Image: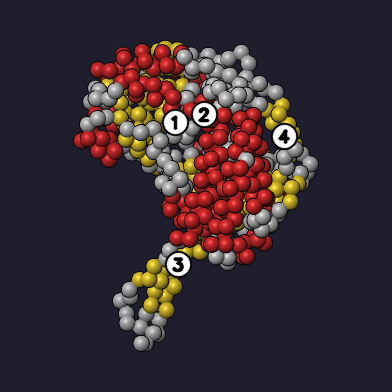
Amino acid sequence: MHKQWINGQWCDAFAGTTWELINPATEKIIQSVPYGDEKDLHLATDAANQALDNWKNQTPYFRADYLKKVAEIIRANVPLFASETILETGKPRNEAEGEWQATANLFEWYAEEGKRSYGRVIPSSRTDKRSQVIYQALGVIGVITAWNFPAHNPSRSVAAALAAGCTVVLKGSEYTPLSSFNLAKAFSLSGIPAGVVNVINGDAPAIGTAMLQHPAIKKISFTGSTRVGEFLMNGAAQTHTKLSLELGGNAPVIIDETVNIEHIAQMAVATKLRNCGQVCIAPQRFYVHESILDAFLSLAKKAMEAIQMGENTGDKILLGPLINKKQQNRVQHIIDRAQKEGASILCGGKVADNGFFIHPTLIHAKQNMSFIQEEFFGPVMCVIGYDTKEQAIQWANETPYGLASYAFTNNLQDAYFYAENLAFGMVGINEWMPHGTELPFGGWKQSGIGHELGAEGLKEYLELKLISVGGIHV
């Protein structure tokens, strides 16, 4: 049985409360897990605060040894950890194992990047003055993460924070606690000092509010909905808690007439359906040039109708379920709304009889339909025809979100036109994965604050300090 991990000890929730974890593919109970509240958060934060001075005052080489051990332990346990991620998310084995491998890579990469938190010496305008900038750990970090990538999402923040010299309290999603507890298992086996990392599970509003109010927590890193992000921003305005927010997305894809239409259509469907569409950078609004629109729709429809759904119990790759009934209902509501607004449902559009499944859905829509402004977060592909590249850019940018965007063209001039005019934090030109461990990940507009991954991700957990010394005579 899995438990919380606080101050180097496995424990139940302080109040003894539990949460019945549901398999989204079968709707059956997997097991009961601890389900805590603000009291658990206080215990974990006190432990992290007590461990802070020793951890941040060690060298980055000392901290790197533990992060590398965590990476090694994760790699040795990928099949086991992935099996439990499959149970609680429904994603296929190749995706679950790939996520845990990428998670191990994060800890190894930040083990090295933590050694490079360089400062600088600044030449002074006075001969008797010497000035330098150094970076120091922020303090205790609260991490609240989403369920769609329950190992990788939290580790983006946790690995960077630990490398920077911070200590951490992690609250994973209550829908995917097994992955969070397996991260804790890797930390436990690494021998990392007690209190440096603490993993709890429980009531999100109560724990989030307690994180904002606890004076020891200097920053909260949150991955999730824009609605909760706004709640945290409002609370942080009162407590001056720093925030990193990775919120919603509504990623456009511009596909022009110069591409290989057969290849692009196949890859578009495959990328759209990764993790059942529950990906913050998932392509959503496909703007396809009118000259190839009918061919694209026909090819995409054929590819979608060939997709098989089911419980991912073996190595066969099946389209898994949505995470819960609420999410299934939300996606179905968007599909129903599209139909009412006059969009054409070319395939799919219905829920399955059992589990939280929705058949892969292809929609031919118009730009003036309001449903396209929603973040689908499901196996729904929306295609809109366009005439000119200027029109495609205008329509692509008509969203309050600004996380990821994509453009496919064999015209070099147009590639740069798209890259420099798409108003998004990440632009993929002729590629579906505009991210990586070493690359900054972050959005514009309502898609978030700050960055994860890359050297920029490390800086999120460091405070800049100016040291200026006067009266120097040499």
Which residue occupies the extreme bottom position in the image?
Answer: 473
Q: Is residue 3 visible?
A: yes
Residue 275, which numbered label? Answer: 2
Mark 4 nearby-residue class (10 Å; few <14, some 14–19, many ≥20): some
Residue drawn at point x = 25 percent, y = 38 percent = 416
Q: Position of residue 209 (x, y in %)?
A: 62, 46
Give the spatial CA distance, label 4 vs label 1. Answer: 30 Å
Quarter holding the C terminus is: bottom left
Q: Are marks 4 and 1 in contact (CB under 8 Å)?
A: no
Q: In the rendered view, does 42 fall on the left or right side of 67?
A: right
Residue 134, which numbered label? Answer: 3
Q: Are marks 2 and 3 in contact (CB under 8 Å)?
A: no
Q: Closer to us: mark 2 or mark 3? A: 2
Residue 282, which numbered label? Answer: 1
Sequence-wise first label, 2 or 3 = 3
Observer-nearest residue: 313 or 369?
Answer: 313
Residue 133, which numbered label? Answer: none
Numbered disc 2: secondary structure = helix
Sequence-wise first label, 1 or 3 = 3
Residue drawn at point x = 66 percent, y = 58 percent = 193
Q: Closer to us: mark 4 or mark 2? A: 2
Callout 4, which amino acid?
Trp
Callout 1, which amino acid?
Ala
Q: In the rendered view, does 313 fall on the left or right side of 119?
A: right
Q: Position of residue 73 (x, y in %)?
A: 61, 46
Residue drawn at point x = 66 percent, y = 26 percent = 23
Sequence-wise first label, 4 or 3 = 4
